[in-house]
Image: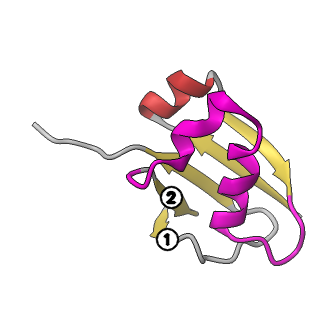
Amino acid sequence: MNVTVLFFASLREALGVERERIALEAGATVDSLRALLIARGEQWQPLSRGSVRAAVNQSLVTGANMLADGDEVAFFPPVTGG
């Protein structure tokens, strides 16, 4: 299955990428996707911070959320208001 992954704000800046398409095994979760990305190396470590949130198809989710083919997964740091 394939998902589109989006990176926002300081994550996008740190990773140097805005979006990418990733092939995953059936049964993948947000946590397994995050682990796959973090395993890429040092540059990807910001995703390991507990404050980085995830949304699937524009709804906030937990790491246990199962992914489906065609899902859009967004990772973003905490947002502050003013």
Residue 47, magenta (yes or no): yes
Type of amino acid under label 1: Val
CB within 8 Å, label 2 to label 1? yes
Residue pictured at 65% horizontal, 55% vertical: 34
The spot of residue 64 in percent (x, y) is 60, 77
| Nearer-the-camera pick, 68 or 31 | 31
| Nearer-the-camera pick, 37 or 65 | 37
Q: Is residue 15 above or below residue 45?
A: above
Residue pictured at 54% horizontal, 24% vertical: 14
Q: Which residue is mark 1?
A: 61
Q: Which residue is mark 2?
A: 54
- State the count of labels: 2
Side of 50 relative to 35 (left or right)? left
The spot of residue 45 in percent (x, y) is 58, 38
| Secondary structure type for disc 1 | strand
The spot of residue 67 in percent (x, y) is 72, 71
Q: Dot 1: within a 10 Å radius of its alpha carbon, few (fewer than 14), some, or many (20 or more) residues? A: some
Q: Quadrant of residue 15?
A: top right
The spot of residue 26 in percent (x, y) is 88, 74
| Secondary structure type for disc 2 | strand
Type of amino acid under label 2: Ala
Q: Dot 2: within a 10 Å radius of its alpha carbon, few (fewer than 14), some, or many (20 or more) residues? A: many
**Segment tinted magenta in the rendering:** 24-51
| Nearer-the-camera pick, 7 or 34 | 34
Side of 6 relative to 51 (left or right)? right
